[in-house]
């Protein structure tokens, strides 16, 4: 009888997941809800609704007192001060931000006691999953009152696809087979099978099966493991502001902060891929046309170099629906690393209840999104740093708290530093080189709009840790990092630095700069003091070397802003998008800044060629779009030069540009609304446009439209 009932429940519980993602080829951001994967067939078990709980008051680690960093000398009033690069110092705790920052209430995803626990048997090298008897006894006579099942998470044939096996019944515990990536576990009440007691999910860092371990012990000692921890959208300043506990952790001995680390592209993909591949978007997209599913398989990443040198490799990133390689892109068709968490995370999103907080999925089931990533890192550290030494290269990336919210770091801080403390106990900081970094700062929203917003956007945090033995063995690397702290550096330098860790391991290899990046060099070697953005391969628009000061937002600057809007409309016309997009108009010039020019001792001078550079922040109608752009102009506004590619969109365009795919067009296009009967198109604004812009059109020849190389570059994404 019971058997019969059970099998019926098993049938009901069976989950078949077929996830088909839309393969669209576009690497823009922000990520909109309309692009979440379609689930063709999905049946979830009953899961009690999850809500956010305020943790008990004591659980919040007290913030360390804010330590104002007071620059002492003239040179210290700049992050970087050299003839060709002057990045002024910004106090992260400046008063302008008092209104912006406030205490963010911490939330936990579940207050229930854990029903399941995971143990690892070091000798037998397997995990065991246990039903926590203490918890059972609080409510039931014994575990026979519960009906528990587990489902194995199975990676699909590609990134867009993952499944779970049919549920297997277990009692009290089961030994997790050595090939399992993860499981979803659930117990129901035996006497009322529709009553769920708890659902949870666990990943496993399994001991590698088919590895020649002959020299692992030796190598684990001699070759440092490399752990990259990434926090999305975190500027150097905002890290100090929102993550004071972690900041304190990374101020300890062995850590080197790169204060002149400058982003090289707009959003996550170009910046993270610059670190992982050492190539600009223009270069890697020669091998990888995003239109072709699986093109990411044909790019060489840091983990490939480390794999070839005998390292184990790992990569985990939260928010799988919008992760770096997968948001509107098809990701990998083959597993890129040995330890790849994505299939597991994809299943979780669909079988567990999720709760949003700070505009992204914060809770997945009983835990935060990012905890799955760092728990996986923890398992790998336990297995391959603490227990059996094996060289490992891993990237662990989180964007769930910080991608859409400048204060999200506050949610992460206390928990992240606890992870770091644990990693320390497991010996990570005795053996591994650790990099804590971000891709870029706040690209839009509160922080992008404050007066230091220019730098907030351009200076992602970068902290590099060298373990004691590495510092002893390579004192020149420690010295170089110390010197590079206040020099201009980029993701390409970081890439070359991380790769150079392999030099002693594979001495035959040459690590040359690419042709595109003749001035790039390993961040582990002293970079030239007098270095400009050109040498570091940082596009001018993203270059933080030029300092800007506020000027009046009327008259001349307003005229320039009108020209930029004209140029934006013209770009849409060049792509034949004027039928799809509405004309933009300048509604308001919000903020204007003029570039300062310094001589070699920090005294301000006039520009040599007479072309002043302005940075304008303005709002367009009809969409209320907030933009920032750089424009060069002679004193009369007759000769102007607009770098179209560098126009930043400061507020989210959400779905207003869904009718176009081009990356730049997405930032500026406001799709026309089709009339309900679909035949004709409304555009009340077109008449206004002709009058207002006729004078600019008359001066068309004066325009420097020779930016065609820019258009060519943008077409890569189409
Ligand atoms: C991914 O796998 C699914 C299921 O096997 C398949 O339908 C889909 O076409 C695959 N996608 C790619 C890009 O290979
Ligand atoms: C069984 O559990 C379900 C779900 O919690 C509940 O709605 C139902 O009332 C329970 N049935 C009995 C007989 O207790
Ligand atoms: C494992 O590697 C060592 C040298 O690194 C080699 O001597 C040995 O033959 C290898 N074993 C197998 C089974 O390949
Ligand atoms: C954008 O999304 C919102 C909410 O989902 C909807 O109300 C609005 O009509 C959408 N706009 C367009 C242009 O589709
Ligand atoms: C579309 O609507 C307009 C007015 O609302 C009407 O004049 C026109 O005939 C309609 N067209 C079609 C194809 O229904």
Image (cartoon, grey):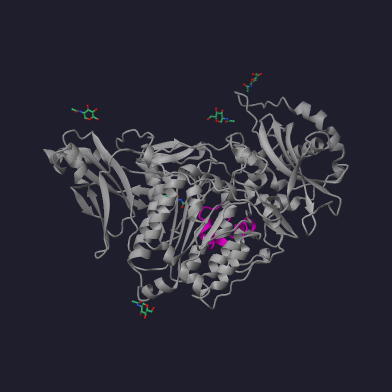
How far across and how far down the image is residue 196, in percent?
25, 36
How many numbered discs?
A: 0
Region of the chain picked out in magenta, as a range? 276-300
Q: Using residue 274 as the reference point, say whether residue 121 is left or right of it.
A: left
Can you say which quadrant of the picture contains the N terminus?
top left
Q: Is residue 299 magenta?
A: yes
Q: In this orientation, which residue lies closer to the viewer: 656 or 555?
A: 555
Q: In the image, residue 248 lies at what x, y percent?
A: 49, 53
Q: Residue 199 magenta-drawn?
A: no
- Looking at the image, can residue 425 be seen? yes
569 to the left or right of 703: left
Residue 286 appears anywhere in the view: no
Q: Quadrant of ligand 4?
A: top right
Q: Residue at x 64, y 33 (%)?
A: 671
Q: Is residue 155 left or right of residue 518?
A: left
Residue at (67% x, 55% y) in the render: 76
Residue 219, by quadrant, is bottom left
697 or 455, which lies in front? Answer: 455
Q: Compared with residue 690, is residue 464 higher up or lower down, i.e. above or below?
A: below
| Position of residue 176 measured from the top left corner of the image (x, y, whole percent) | 26, 55
Report the side of 429 relative to 89 (left or right): left
Q: Nearer the viewer, residue 535 or 171?
A: 535
Q: Residue furthest left?
A: 1
């Amino acid at each position: 009888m019971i058997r019969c009932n059970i099998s019926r429940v098993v049938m009901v519980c069976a989950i078949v997941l077929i996830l088909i993602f839309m393969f669209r080829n576009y690497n823009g951001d922000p990520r909109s809800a309309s692009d979440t994967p379609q689930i063709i067939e999905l049946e979830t078990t009953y899961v009690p609704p999850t809500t956010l709980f305020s943790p008990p008051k004591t659980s919040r680690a007290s913030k360390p007192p804010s330590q104002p960093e007071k620059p002492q000398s003239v040179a210290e009033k700049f992050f970087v001060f050299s003839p060709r690069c002057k990045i002024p110092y910004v106090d992260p705790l400046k008063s302008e931000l008092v209104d912006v920052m406030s205490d963010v209430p911490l939330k936990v995803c579940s207050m229930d006691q854990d029903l399941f626990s995971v143990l690892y048997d070091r000798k037998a090298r397997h995990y065991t999953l246990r039903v926590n008897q203490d918890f059972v006894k609080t409510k039931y006579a014994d575990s026979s009152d519960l009906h528990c099942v587990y489902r194995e998470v199975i990676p699909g044939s590609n990134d867009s696809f993952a499944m779970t096996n049919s549920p297997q019944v277990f009692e009290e515990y089961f030994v997790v087979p050595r090939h399992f990536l993860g499981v979803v576990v659930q117990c129901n009440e035996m006497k009322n099978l529709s009553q769920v007691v708890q659902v949870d999910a666990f990943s496993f860092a399994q001991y590698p099966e088919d590895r020649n371990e002959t020299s692992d012990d030796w190598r684990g000692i001699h070759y440092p493991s490399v752990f990259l921890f990434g926090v999305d959208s975190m500027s150097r300043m905002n890290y100090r502001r929102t993550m004071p506990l972690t900041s304190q952790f990374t101020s300890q001995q062995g850590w080197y902060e790169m204060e002149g680390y400058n982003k090289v592209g707009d959003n996550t993909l170009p910046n993270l891929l610059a670190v992982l591949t050492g190539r600009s978007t223009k270069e890697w997209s020669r091998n990888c046309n995003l239109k072709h599913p699986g093109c990411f398989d044909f790019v060489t990443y840091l983990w490939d170099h480390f794999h070839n040198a005998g390292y184990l490799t790992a990569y985990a990133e939260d928010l799988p629906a919008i992760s770096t390689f997968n948001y509107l892109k098809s990701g990998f068709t083959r597993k890129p690393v040995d330890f790849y968490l994505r299939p597991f995370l994809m299943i979780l999103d669909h079988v567990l209840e999720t709760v949003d907080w700070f505009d992204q999925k914060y809770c997945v089931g009983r835990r935060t999104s990012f905890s799955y990533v760092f728990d996986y890192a923890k398992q790998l550290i336990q297995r391959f740093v603490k227990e059996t030494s094996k060289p490992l290269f891993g990237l662990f990336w989180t964007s769930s708290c910080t991608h859409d919210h400048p204060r999200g770091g506050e949610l992460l801080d206390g928990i992240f530093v606890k992870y770091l403390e644990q990693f320390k106990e497991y010996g990570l900081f005795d053996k591994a080189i650790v990099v804590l970094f971000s891709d870029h700062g706040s690209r839009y929203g509160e922080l992008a709009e404050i007066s230091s917003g220019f730098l907030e956007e351009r200076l992602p945090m970068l902290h590099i840790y060298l373990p004691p033995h590495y510092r002893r063995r390579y004192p020149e690397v420690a010295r170089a990092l110390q010197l590079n702290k206040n020099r201009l550096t980029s993701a390409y330098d970081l890439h070359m630095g991380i790769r150079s860790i392999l030099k002693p391991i594979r001495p035959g290899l040459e690590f040359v700069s690419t042709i595109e990046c003749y001035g790039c060099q390993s961040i582990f070697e002293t970079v030239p003091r007098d270095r400009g953005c050109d040498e570091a391969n940082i596009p001018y628009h993203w270059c933080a070397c030029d300092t800007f000061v506020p000027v009046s937002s009327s008259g001349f600057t307003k005229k320039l802003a009108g020209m930029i809007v004209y140029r934006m409309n013209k770009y849409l016309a060049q792509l034949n998008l004027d039928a799809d997009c509405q004309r933009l108009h300048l509604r308001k010039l919000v903020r204007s800044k003029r570039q300062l020019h310094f001589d070699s001792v920090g005294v301000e001078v006039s520009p040599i060629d007479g072309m002043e550079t302005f940075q304008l922040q303005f709002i367009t109608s009809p969409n209320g779009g907030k933009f920032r752009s750089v424009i060069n102009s002679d004193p009369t506004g007759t000769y102007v030069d607009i770098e179209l590619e560098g126009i930043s969109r400061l507020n989210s365009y959400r779905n207003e540009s869904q009718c176009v795919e081009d990356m730049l067009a997405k930032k500026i296009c406001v799709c026309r609304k089709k009339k309900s009967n679909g035949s004709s198109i409304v555009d009340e604004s077109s008449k206004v446009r002709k009058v207002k812009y006729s004078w600019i059109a008359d001066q068309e020849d004066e325009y420097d439209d020779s930016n065609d190389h820019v258009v060519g570059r943008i077409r890569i994404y189409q």
